[in-house]
Image: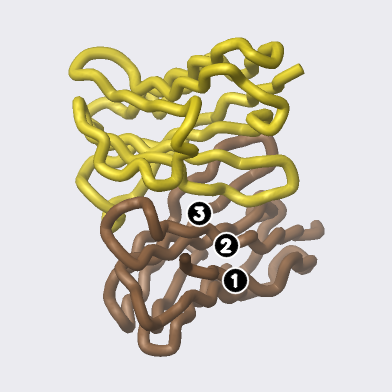
């Protein structure tokens, strides 16, 4: 069973700061990596799906990179806004089905105005 | 374009009763995943279904739990003879294609409380 880790566990930044956090996964058996944004009392919102080593994806002020050889992905937020406050989850899979689709514990981001 | 819908949003059952959770995927999506979030824990995969087929049910307890996604109608997660340990939030997600290279769109979840 995969072990997916995220760091830091929580993060407080000031409005306007840029920030980044890490998702680590076993590199020996990789198929896909997902990032989600999860606001309190809402449902997880898909941000990115990445499958190839070196993938970089961007959506507005949020971007992500993937290194499958060393087993990590970074999520970057440029110019954080209070509405970015949420828990950011990553999930990694070693195959194309669900058995090995494992979510990390999340990074809780608070952006202070 | 309606998103993924789940009902009920909250469900209270006594020990020994049955719980039925429904998930209507986004229009055009024929793939559904079910996840469970136990208190103080993260999301855990339960089952992956395509219409009329169970693709992967390896994350679902072998007893009392079953899932279906009929040709017509919503996907249903059924829990028989519920116990207190089944109290959790159950989320479904739908996807436009087969497998994990596609984004998943989550519903709002059903909070099951077993008394």
Task: Classify residue B99 as left or right of residue B85.
Answer: left
Q: Are marks 2 and 1 in contact (CB under 8 Å)?
A: yes
| Residue under numbered circle 3 | A36
In the picture as drawn, the residue positioned furthest to the bottom comes out as A70
- Labels 3, 2: front one: 2
- Give A1 or A6, whichever is nearer the viewer: A1
SS of the residue under disc 1: strand
The hue of chain A in the figure is brown
Which badge, 1 or 3, comes first in the chain's sequence? 1
A60 shown above or below B42: below
Label 3: which secondary element: strand
Tell me residue A76's x, y (percent). Answer: 54, 72
Q: Where does the image place residue A97, in percent across and percent down from the top left?
A: 30, 53
Q: Chain of mark 1?
A: A
The answer to which quarter of the image holds residue B77 is: top left
The chain ID associated with circle 2 is A
Which chain contains the residue that carries disc 3? Answer: A
Give the residue pinned by disc 2. Answer: A104
Task: Report which colour depicts chain B.
Answer: yellow
- Label 1 Cα crowd, 10 Å radius (few <14 / some 14-19 / many 20+): many
Residue at figure coordinates x 46%, y 47% from the top left: B45
- Residue carrying label 1: A5
């Amino acid at each position: 069973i995969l072990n997916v880790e995220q760091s830091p566990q929580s993060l407080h930044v000031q409005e306007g700061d840029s920030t980044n956090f890490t998702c680590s996964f076993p590199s020996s058996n990789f198929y896909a990596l997902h990032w989600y944004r999860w606001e309190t009392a809402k449902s997880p919102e898909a941000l990115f799906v990445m499958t190839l080593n070196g993938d970089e994806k961007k959506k507005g002020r949020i971007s992500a990179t993937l290194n499958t050889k060393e087993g990590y992905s970074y999520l970057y937020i440029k110019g954080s806004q209070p509405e970015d406050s949420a828990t950011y989850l990553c999930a990694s899979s070693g195959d194309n089905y669900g058995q090995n689709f494992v979510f990390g514990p999340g990074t809780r981001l608070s952006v202070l105005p | 374009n309606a998103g993924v819908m789940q009902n009920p949003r909250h469900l209270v059952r006594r020990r020994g009763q049955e719980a039925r959770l429904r998930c209507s995927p986004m229009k055009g999506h024929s793939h559904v995943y079910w996840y469970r979030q136990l208190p103080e824990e993260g999301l855990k995969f339960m089952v992956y279904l395509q219409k009329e087929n169970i693709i992967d049910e390896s994350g679902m307890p072998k007893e009392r739990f079953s899932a279906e996604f009929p040709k017509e109608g919503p996907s249903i997660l059924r829990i028989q003879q519920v116990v207190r340990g089944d109290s959790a939030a159950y989320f479904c997600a739908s996807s436009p294609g087969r497998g994990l290279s596609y984004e998943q769109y989550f519903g709002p979840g059903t909070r099951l409380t077993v008394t």
